[in-house]
Image (spheres, rainbow, N blue to C red):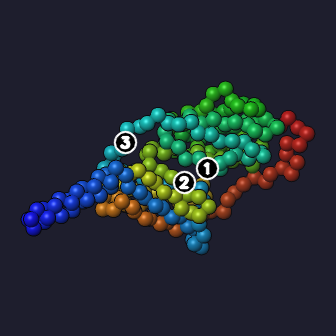
Amino acid sequence: MTCIRSFAVRALAVGLALASSCARAEGTTIAATVTDMKGKPVADAVVVAIPADGASKPAAKSREATIDQIDLEFVPRVLAISVGTPVTFPNHDRVRHHVYSFSPAKRFELPLYSGMPAQAVVFDQPGVVVLGCNIHDWMISYVYVSESPYYAKTGPDGRATINELPSRAYVVRVWHPELEGPEEGTRRNVDTSRSARADVAWQVDLRPEMKVRRAPAAGRGSRY
């Protein structure tokens, strides 16, 4: 009887170990924190994890994303998407906008319009795409097109979580519109094969935000 109980205990321990291993294999987490040099949380930073061995999950069909135009501003200011994602640009203002980008990763124009453009814009190359409005110079937005399916954007608390990662080693980096220096300079090596959760933190140096002054009476009594 003692041998049977001992065998049962060992079998249970092996089962629990296998279950824990399978749970890590199904999905691990990278929890990121980004602060500035004064220790303040940095919002709108994009955290990207790239498998160190070059492997990645098969590309799924990208869901459509949206950048709104509300009160003569782009919302959100920073959008993070995967390569191949279509993005719509609805105009909820009472004036017309002319959305454009001259960025190498995606050049396009949506001439003066109200409401919803006829077609979404597909972002088919990785990189950072800077958006502007040809009528309202202060309107600026950024689309971060990630080559990896594993990414997240920090909130007001400077935190971002990348979930459902295969258990392996990653190169993780951070991008922000005001980041001082190249994105490659933020690289961190993170191994999620040893734990279901990996915590990583950055303290980044940011340039002052440069923004065109908004016109005091923009949009009032005008089609533009």
Residue 78: mark in rendering: 1
Can residue 200 be seen here? The reply is yes
Q: Position of residue 186 (x, y in %)?
A: 46, 61
What distance separates the C-alpha of mark 1 from that of mark 3? 25 Å
What distance separates the C-alpha of mark 2 from that of mark 3? 20 Å
Q: Give the amino acid at mark 2.
A: Lys
Q: Which residue occupies the foreground of this view, 144 or 64?
A: 64
Identify the residue at horizontal 85%, vertical 45% (top origin): 218
Can residue 186 be seen here? The reply is no
- Mark 2 Cα shell of 10 Å, populated few (<14), some (14-19), many (≥20): many
Please say if 212 is above or below 109: below
Q: Position of residue 101 (x, y in %)?
A: 64, 39
Q: Give the amino acid at mark 3.
A: Lys
Q: Quadrant of residue 21?
A: bottom left
Q: Give the amino acid at mark 1.
A: Val
Q: Is residue 221 left or right of residue 35?
A: right
Q: Quadrant of residue 92?
A: top right
The residue that label 2 is drawn on is 153
Q: Is residue 59 left or right of residue 95?
A: left
The residue that label 3 is drawn on is 57
Identify the residue at horizontal 51%, vertical 52% (top origin): 152
Q: Nearer the viewer, mark 1 or mark 2?
A: 2
Q: Which residue occupies the foreground of this view, 23 or 14?
A: 14
